[in-house]
Amino acid sequence: MKKILCIGAGYVGGPTMAVIAKHCPELEIVCVDINEDRIRAWQSDDLPIYEPGLLDVVQQVRGKNLFFSTDIVGNIPDADLIFVSVNTPTKTFGQGAGRAADLQYWEKTARQILQYSRSDTIVVEKSTLPVRTAEAMHRILDSRSSGPKFEVLSNPEFLAEGTAIADLESPDRVLIGGPTTPAGQKAVEALAAIYRHWVPAEKILTTNVWSSEMSKLAANAFLAQRVSSINSLSALCEATDADITEVSRALGMDRRIGGRFLQAGVGFGGSCFKKDILNLVYLCEHYGLHEVGAYWQMVVEINHYQQRRFVHRMIQSMFNTLAGKRIAIFGFAFKAHTSDTRESPGIEICRELVEEHAQVVIHDPKALENAAKDLHDLPQKQLVFESDPYRAAEGAHAIALLTDWPQFQTLDYRRIFQSMVQPAFLFDGRNLLNHADLFEIGFNVYSIGKRPLSHLD
Ligand SMILES: NC(=O)c1ccc[n+]([C@@H]2O[C@H](COP(=O)([O-])OP(=O)(O)OC[C@H]3O[C@@H](n4cnc5c(N)ncnc54)[C@H](O)[C@@H]3O)[C@@H](O)[C@H]2O)c1
């Protein structure tokens, strides 16, 4: 094995290849993309994505054994192994629209590999795909009677944005699904050998291709389900005066349940959870498993419900109207430590606020550029993008905190309160702040799954 190619230089392709390059100096790794701007950014120190620690790793290997390029076809012929990590969004047209995965980028890549490969090649699906996609890819690659032979493996990526480098450096597990044939097993071993440069052998799991594809969808569905489960209970807490933080703590101390992914909030976002669950639902329906599909569909429904509920509570508590009111949004990224806003709850919430004729001032430490893109179709006179949280809050009737950026915890809320229109409201959509302190300062504090702390009752 000498040369690795990665097709798709996004949130997965870029960081994954950088970490492989760091640990495998003997390999030449080229990361390609059709998006010229992205490649140019990867070649600079202004990387196309923000991820803690990423720039450091890229600087260690770029130009040595990691290269970024737009020349896709020129890099295919001599690649021994090709990772495919192109995007696989939800289909927006035709059959399965809104649910099935859109596999057009994926299939185009398969056909390019078939056309330009000159020697036997291992093709690795890194993108998250519906179960049995690797088989379809194998059929495409196997469609010629002569020429190079291909082995198709599934090696889903489990990194989480915001902690991608730490996750790649020390993964809970690496999953490799491959055909059970001798050639398939040889390919699995070749890929496992790359990971063994830094991942302990016992953490490298090998399965059949379908189990590997299924495990990735299932892992995301389980994680999202925990978020929707605790969020559904947050609604009940608000109705009953139970406190969701206390409930989460009590639940999490049960070792059978565990404490992670039990924080109530405005809901999950990110490019993967919703897309992968919808994918799972579509698969269930395809196989006639309607009850199973309906079960997982509810995880997505509860997530929307939680966002609508949040806005509803804002309207209700602010005297049933937001029209003309200035609302400062603290955080637009779908979670802390990333600039990614794909499927962020902020998108839906800001859209609803604009629909209520509010004046929405968005502040985020890293995601303002993406926020502006996400909301470009809204009336711009109702939107302000503000890099300074104090200026965002100045003259505002309310603050809505939507992302758990830790720096929001150390702002001077007394100063912020004094600059706001009274009575000042604070809606903590991540239960991140010290609510008792804020109440004492004078805020009317609304959080998730807790009794409001209001001076108006
Ligand atoms: N983002 C995550 O946290 C994460 C985690 C695990 C798995 N995944 C999965 O990995 C896959 C990629 O996700 P991402 O977040 O990196 O997406 P992304 O959109 O950031 O990156 C995909 C890249 O592929 C490029 N591309 C598309 N078609 C191409 C083609 N024909 N040739 C060359 N490049 C092409 C796009 O220009 C884009 O830069 C998805 O299937 C996703 O579900 C994502």
Image (cartoon, rainbow, N blue to C red):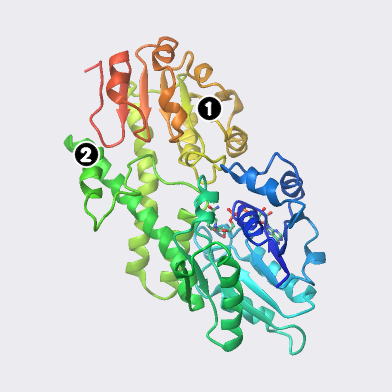
Label 1 belongs to which residue?
363
Q: Is residue 91 left or right of residue 140?
A: left
Among the 4 quarters of the image, the one containing residue 46: top right
Vertical placement of 153 versus 457: above or below? Answer: below
Among the 4 quarters of the image, the one containing residue 214: bottom left
Earlier-in-chain disc, 1 versus 2 = 2
- In front: 189, or 357? 189
Labels 1 and 2 touching (C-beta < 8 A): no
Label 2 belongs to which residue?
246
Q: Position of residue 35 (x, y in %)?
A: 73, 51
Mark 1 element type: strand
Disc number for residue 121: none
Mark 2 element type: helix
The C terminus - image quarter = top left
Q: Position of residue 156 (x, y in %)?
A: 53, 65
Three-letter code, disc 2:
Glu
The N terminus - image quarter = bottom right
- In front: 237, or 147? 147
The answer to whether mark 1 is within 8 Å of ligand 1 is no
How packed mark 2 is, by other alpha carbons closer than 10 Å (few <14, some 14-19, many 20 or more), is few
Residue ranking furthest to the top: 418
Give the Cα separation between the discs numbered 1 and 2.
30 Å
Residue 242 shows up from this direction: yes
Q: Is residue 335 left or right of residue 240?
A: right
Vertical placement of 227 versus 367: above or below? Answer: below
